[in-house]
Amino acid sequence: MLLVGNDERAVHHRSDFWRDPPYEGHQSEGSTMLSESDLALVNALQLRPRAPWSLIGRALGVGPVTVARHWERLVERREAWLTAYPGAAVGERLAFAFVQVDCAPGEAMRVARTVAGDAELTAVDYVAGPCDLVLHLVASSLEGVSRYVVDRVSGLRGVVGTRTLVAPRMYAEGSRWQVRAISREQRGLLMAAESSSSAGMVPRFGELDRDLLLALGENARASHAELASRLGVGASTVRRHLGAALAGGVIRLRCEVARSLSPAPVTMLLWLRVPPDQLERAARTLGRFPEVRMCAAVSGAANLLVGVWLRSAGDAVGLESEMVAKLSRLEIVDRAVTLRAVKLGGCLLDERGRIEGRVAMDFWGGV
């Protein structure tokens, strides 16, 4: 049984399921979820995106060539992919905001597609809720946030109103979410092999780190030699900078999966309010929920915005009840269900949530 969350009941640690029909063939257009072997591989790459195929294969009980080919199939079918983005060490020098957009009837998807190619937006969601679109905006400053909303979004044909929620702090972000399709022992094997050679190094973000981030955004598993050739530096320089950037949280990598084929295909946004003196504790508590993909402090009537991924819309009832049970003074101000994710993590998505393009996340150039 495959579950999202902390349940340790995962796929059996055996190699034969990699040769079952779901692996040798592919998911049909009517499939509702990826196969067990697909999810196991995705989970392994969520833990160690750049781990050698030999290690991934050892953890999953298959050979390195088999697991590499399996990943190639997932990528070719556009059902899973890797991406790179700035981590918290860089994020402290950036301005984050969520923009609620009201559109004229019939204009929401046209507006969403228009802005999806903008580098300033990491995500674009068409939702059922207090607005038509929710834009996840990143800029080099609050002035940049203002310029983008006023000069770009507000003037678009079809936009009838906007509300901007500045996010002074991000408590949790997407790289923490996992499909939880492998066992504790398999996760332990993957994480035990993680290099600690760069541990304790001071995070930094220079021009080379920026170039590395852009290159990894196109191919997160590119070798040190490939990255060195592209950037015009030595492989040892790339190895040193990349090791420090990953260890220090300057660069984060994550493995995404098409939402419609994942164990948690429903996305919801919850606008929450807690007493100001309980904000930090509430954010930490909410961040421990396995369904929580994102948690941010925001301006406005609500002071927390939480993004959750669920197995069904009905699961929201139980989740909200559990949240209130753990945080007695929490109020749910509003909620929205994502009807269509147009962009996620800088990647453009089709109607089934499969990747169909990338937009370089070069929004930190002024920091």
Image (cartoon, rainbow, N blue to C red):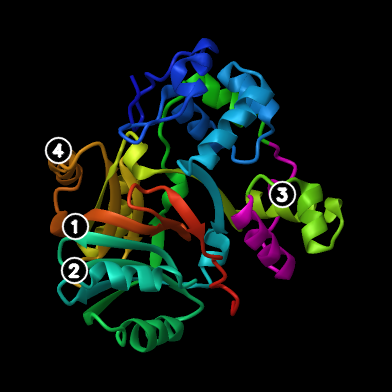
The disc placed on residue 243 is 3
**Left or right: 7 in relation to 45:** left
| Residue highlighted by disc 2 | 131
Disc 4: which residue: 318
> Could you give the CA–CA distance between mark 2 and mark 4, rounded to whole angstroms?
24 Å
Of tags 4 and 1, which is closer to the observer?
1
> What segment carries the magenta color?
195-219
Quick check: is 255 in the magenta stretch? no
CB atoms at circles 1 and 2 under 8 Å apart?
yes
In which quadrant of the rendered view does residue 53 lie? top right
Q: Residues within 10 Å of mark 1 (few under 14, many from 20)?
A: many
Q: Earlier in the sequence, mark 3 or mark 1?
A: 3
Discs 3/1, front:
1
| Proximity of marks 3 and 4: CB atoms separated by less than 8 Å | no
Tell me, yes or no, whether the highlighted magenta stretch contains residue 205: yes
Residue drawn 34% across the image and 47% down it: 352
Q: In terms of secondary structure, where does tag 4 sit?
A: helix
N-terminal label among 4 and 1: 4
Kindly identify which residue carries mark 1: 336
| Residue 339 place in picture, x, y as percent | 23, 54
